[in-house]
Image (spheres, rainbow, N blue to C red):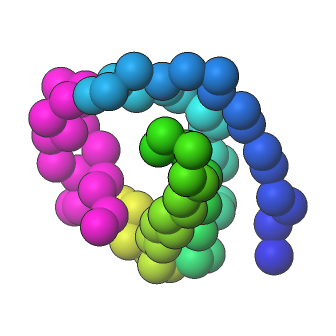
């Protein structure tokens, strides 16, 4: 199990993105779970994204529309 890291962004405009942290390739062999907590109005929400082990790879790369770069998407 890897450690938990936390990053706070005071403001992230709609349809924008921010680079949080570079992952070491060795970690791609593990399940990688990311939790995003955010406020909408006065209500707090949390969304969990799970990248299953070995799903972050070159074959899974696709264009990320908002960023105009190649990456791996998870729903």
**61 vs 8: above or below:** below
Indicate left or right for 31 with 58 as reference.
Answer: right
Q: Residue at x 59, y 68 (%)?
A: 33
Q: Residue at x 82, y 58 (%)?
A: 4
Quadrant of the rendered image containing residue 51: bottom left
Q: Nearer the viewer, residue 13 or 23?
A: 13
Q: Would residue 63 be counted in the magenta stretch?
A: yes
Tell me residue 68's x, y (percent): 18, 25
**11 vs 45: above or below:** above
Question: Which of the image's four quarters has the C terminus?
Answer: bottom left
Tell me residue 71's x, y (percent): 30, 44
Question: Which of the image's four quarters has the N terminus?
Answer: bottom right
Q: How many marks?
A: 0
Q: Residue at x 20, y 39 (%)?
A: 64
Q: Which range is magenta?
A: 59-75
Tell me residue 47's x, y (percent): 49, 63
Q: Nearer the viewer, residue 56 or 11?
A: 11
Quadrant of the rendered image containing residue 27: bottom right
**30 vs 64: above or below:** below
Question: Furthest residue to the right?
Answer: 3
Tell me residue 32's x, y (percent): 58, 68
Any part of residue 25 in sight: no
Q: Would residue 27 be counted in the magenta stretch?
A: no
Any part of residue 37 in sight: yes
């Amino acid at each position: 199990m890897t450690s938990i890291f936390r990053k706070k962004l005071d403001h992230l405009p709609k349809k924008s993105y921010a680079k949080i942290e570079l992952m070491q390739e060795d970690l791609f062999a593990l399940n990688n779970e990311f939790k995003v907590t955010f406020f909408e109005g006065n209500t707090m929400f949390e969304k969990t994204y799970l990248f299953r082990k070995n799903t972050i790879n070159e074959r899974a790369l696709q264009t990320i529309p908002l960023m105009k770069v190649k990456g791996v998407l998870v729903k």
